[in-house]
Structures are given as structure tokens and as C-alpha cells.
Image (cartoon, rainbow, N blue to C red):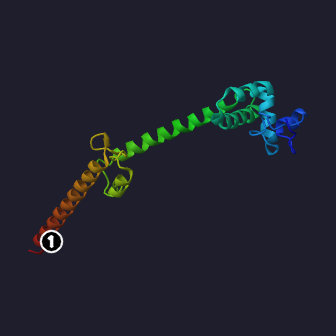
Amino acid sequence: MDKISTPCAACKHLRRKCTEDCVFAPYFPTTKQENYEAVHKVFGASHVSSLINDLHPLKREFAMNSLAWEARVRVKDPVYGCTAIIRRLQSQLKDSEEQLAIFKNELASYGTVPTFVQPPPMMYQQMHNNPMTISEYTPNNGGFLTGQQLHDEAQRFASTQSAQMQQTQETQMQHNEIDRD
């Protein structure tokens, strides 16, 4: 049990000598004094020490980072802690879902898929060695189409638009000829 030259944040806070086998040293170096103080205040040193010892060594760092984050949040908001953050994020998610529904309804009001909607290139599919999983909303059937189906729908829309424009031009030419006579 040799003495380490600089004590970890836990040993510094507890005013004791830091040794090589200190369980806190790898997770709370001197530079993370605030983290340890928050963890100590919220969870207590003995609980954290037993938690570290009970965890698999590969999971300890993640657990200590999580505890430090939870403790810092709990110190700032003693009543709600991280649940306030979770509620805010859930509210933002709900708002985003509502906006998405509004946009889908607006898109559905156009009645067809715009020609500018294109599926990702085939190279993207080949790079990932799996069928396309990205779906695009299309109001024609009120559901979702795969990339290939969307591409076919866009091509059909473009050819329909082209045929309508050609028919309109022919009609205008006929009216112009009638006007000349």
C-alpha cells in the first residue's frame, strides 16, 4: 500500500492518504473534484465504494460516469433530478411527432408524390449489404413505400405530369388555330 503522489478527488475530500488500491482513484481523479463531491453528497462514499466493488471491471467507468451525471443533476434539482430532463425531452419528442403529423397531412393534401423525392442511390444499399430500410411517406395510399416503390411512383408522377403538359399544349395549339380561322 504505497502512497500516491497526488490524492484522488475522494481521498482529498475525505482528507485521507490515497493508496494504489484506492477504488475511487481511477474514476475520480483530482481534476474531477466536483463530480466526486456531488456523488458523495447524493449517494455517500460507502455506497459508491461497495457499488464499484460489486461491478464487473469493464462496467465500472460507465457506472461512475452515470452516477456522477445523476448526482450533478440531483444537486441542481433536488426534487426531480434527471426526471425533469427526461420530461423535457419527452415533451420535445411529442412536439416533434405532432409537427411531423402536420407535415404529413400537408404533404397528403398535394395528392401525389413530388418529383424531387428520390430514393438513396443503390451504392448506399450495396455498401450496407442489406435491403433498403428507409421508407418515405407517400399520400397516394396513405402509407409508406420502400425506396424502389417510391422511385417508381415518382417516375409515374413525372410521366403523368409530362403527358398532362403535352395535352395542355396541344389544346392551346388547337384553340390558337381556331382563333386564326
Image coordinates for residue 10, horizontal then vertical, percent: 83, 35
In this orientation, which residue lies closer to the viewer: 59 or 100? Answer: 59
Image coordinates for residue 24, horizontal then vertical, percent: 78, 35
In this orientation, which residue lies closer to the viewer: 50 or 67? Answer: 50
In this orientation, which residue lies closer to the viewer: 133 or 57? Answer: 57
Q: Residue placed at 34% from the left, 54% from the top?
A: 126
To which residue does mark 1 refer? 176
- Residue 162 visible at all: yes
Residue furthest right as drawn: 15
Judge the density around disc 1: few (<14), some (14-19), many (≥20) Cα neighbours within 10 Å: few
Quadrant assignment for the C terminus? bottom left
Quadrant assignment for the N terminus? top right
The image quarter containing residue 67 is top right
Residue furthest front as drawn: 1
Q: Decide: is 53 above or below 117.
A: above
In this orientation, which residue lies closer to the viewer: 61 or 155? Answer: 61
- Residue 112 visible at all: no
Question: Is 106 left, or right, of 69 in this rendering?
Answer: left
Residue furthest bottom as drawn: 180
Image coordinates for residue 139, horizontal then vertical, percent: 31, 44
Q: Amino acid at mark 1?
A: Asn
Is label 1 in a helix, a strand or a loop? helix
Question: Is 75 left, or right, of 15 in this rendering?
Answer: left
Q: Residue placed at 90% from the left, 33% from the top?
A: 16
Image coordinates for residue 136, horizontal then vertical, percent: 35, 46
Q: Residue placed at 18% from the left, 60% from the top?
A: 163
The image quarter containing residue 42 is top right
